[in-house]
């Protein structure tokens, strides 16, 4: 931002400082929550040991890359931290960031507070794809143990099919927007229709499924960050990071669109191009997360509303603030889900649904206005 006399007003500096401090404080809180999340569970690990294991593990892996012949000792604590809890916690952060940044961008693009990737039916498309892989392609099986009753024994097949239907839903929405004009109302209504269509398709498949297949489909639709491996986490991180940078780079375009399409066009913004490109990127992020982790609702819808009430509508701060809030919300939910009925572990999507619905209703009752 440029000022005529070259002097930045003190009020503006205070405005920037307050919002930046809020985002920085949220990032620090997220780091603390990461250590706490890894420390709790069926086997308690002191936070100091968690921090030491992470630091030493990073140093050992760097040393192994530089000196392949070197070896390092792996303790039982290291196995729990590095093989189980750290990838799960990081997957929660990455998924929370991805869903939130996609949600805040979609709400700005559609200029509608109910706009989000899930409103466009992409999550239901992914669930339908998972149902197809389990029921028609035999990707699920039943075990005798209660703790691990259902297993997706071919997760890559399930991921590919779910990802395909997520992208198919995105292509249909974009095609409809081009045929009828890229108005926010048309895209939201198209998403509602697609959501109903894919939900009906999933119910149709479940009706003819066996008990084992039905249980496997239901298991998949429960979003669970614990199913992500390091490889899947790496893919999600690359996609979410690239998408976040894209949305941040377009922050001024989204600020202009928030003022209205005509105003944005008067400022030189290609509204249709920005809207279509933003939809593709947001849908891609959601598709990758849903295909790897299952359906996790409310994060992309509620977090942007929470951040707006704290730091306002300025996309320069709303986008990174939503990223931080998404990571905090989903990581905290996953932590509670692991200990609330210990030794059993609830899928995080169950808790986000219980927490997200009343929070969203509360925000509506408080009279949120764009």
Image (cartoon, rainbow, N blue to C red):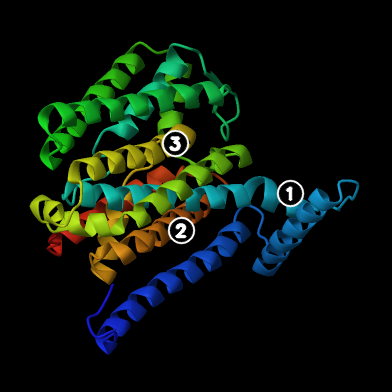
Residue lying at 43% horizontally and 11% vertically, measured from the top left: 136
Assign a secondary structure to mark 2. helix
The residue that label 3 is drawn on is 288
Question: Residue 294 location in percent, x, y?
Answer: 43, 35
Question: Residue 307 location in percent, x, y?
Answer: 30, 64
Residue lying at 27% horizontally and 75% vertically, measured from the top left: 2
Residue lying at 72% horizontally and 57% vertically, measured from the top left: 58
The residue that label 2 is drawn on is 332
Question: Residue 326 location in percent, x, y?
Answer: 39, 56
Residue lying at 67% horizontally and 65% vertically, measured from the top left: 51
- Can residue 341 be seen from the camera position used here? no
- Mark 2 / mark 1, whichever is N-terminal: 1
Cα separation, mark 2 vs mark 3, equals: 22 Å
- In this picture, is 26 found above or below 44? below
Assign a secondary structure to mark 3. helix
- Can residue 248 be seen from the camera position used here? yes
Q: Which numbered disc covers residue 259?
A: none
Question: Residue 176 location in percent, x, y?
Answer: 17, 27
Determine whether, in the image, residue 27 is placed left or right of residue 169. right
Which quadrant holds residue 256? bottom left
């Amino acid at each position: 931002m440029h000022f005529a006399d070259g002097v930045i007003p003190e009020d503006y500096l205070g405005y920037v400082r307050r919002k930046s401090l809020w985002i920085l404080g949220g990032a620090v809180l997220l780091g603390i929550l990461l250590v706490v999340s890894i420390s709790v569970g069926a086997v308690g690990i002191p936070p100091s040991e968690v921090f030491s294991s992470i630091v030493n593990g990073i140093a050992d892996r760097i040393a192994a890359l530089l000196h392949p012949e070197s070896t390092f000792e792996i303790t039982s604590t290291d196995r729990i931290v590095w093989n189980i809890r750290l990838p799960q916690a990081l997957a929660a952060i990455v998924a929370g960031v991805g869903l939130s940044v996609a949600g805040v961008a979609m709400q700005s693009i559609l200029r509608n507070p109910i706009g989000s990737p899930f409103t466009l039916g992409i999550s239901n498309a992914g669930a339908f794809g998972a149902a197809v892989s389990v029921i028609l392609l035999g990707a699920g099986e039943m075990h005798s143990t209660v703790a691990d009753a259902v297993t997706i024994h071919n997760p890559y097949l399930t991921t590919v099919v779910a990802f395909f239907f997520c992208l198919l839903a995105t292509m249909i929405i974009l095609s409809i927007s081009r045929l009828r004009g890229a108005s926010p109302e048309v895209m939201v209504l198209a998403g509602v229709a697609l959501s109903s269509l894919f939900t009906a398709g999933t119910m149709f498949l479940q009706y003819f499924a066996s008990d084992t297949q039905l249980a496997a489909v239901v298991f998949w639709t429960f979003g669970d960050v614990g199913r992500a491996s390091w490889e899947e986490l790496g893919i999600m991180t690359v996609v979410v990071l690239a998408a976040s940078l894209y949305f941040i780079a377009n922050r001024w375009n989204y600020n202009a669109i928030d003022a209205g399409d005509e105003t944005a066009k008067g400022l030189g913004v290609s509204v249709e191009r920005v809207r279509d490109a933003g939809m593709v990127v947001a849908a891609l992020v959601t598709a990758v997360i849903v295909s790897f982790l299952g359906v996790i609702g409310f994060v992309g819808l509620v977090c942007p509303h929470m951040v707006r009430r704290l730091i306002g509508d300025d996309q320069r701060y709303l986008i990174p603030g939503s990223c931080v809030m998404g990571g905090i919300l989903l990581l905290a939910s996953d932590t509670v889900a692991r200990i609330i009925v210990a030794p059993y572990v609830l899928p995080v999507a169950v808790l986000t649904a219980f927490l997200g619905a009343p929070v969203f209703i509360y925000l509506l009752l408080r009279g949120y206005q764009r």
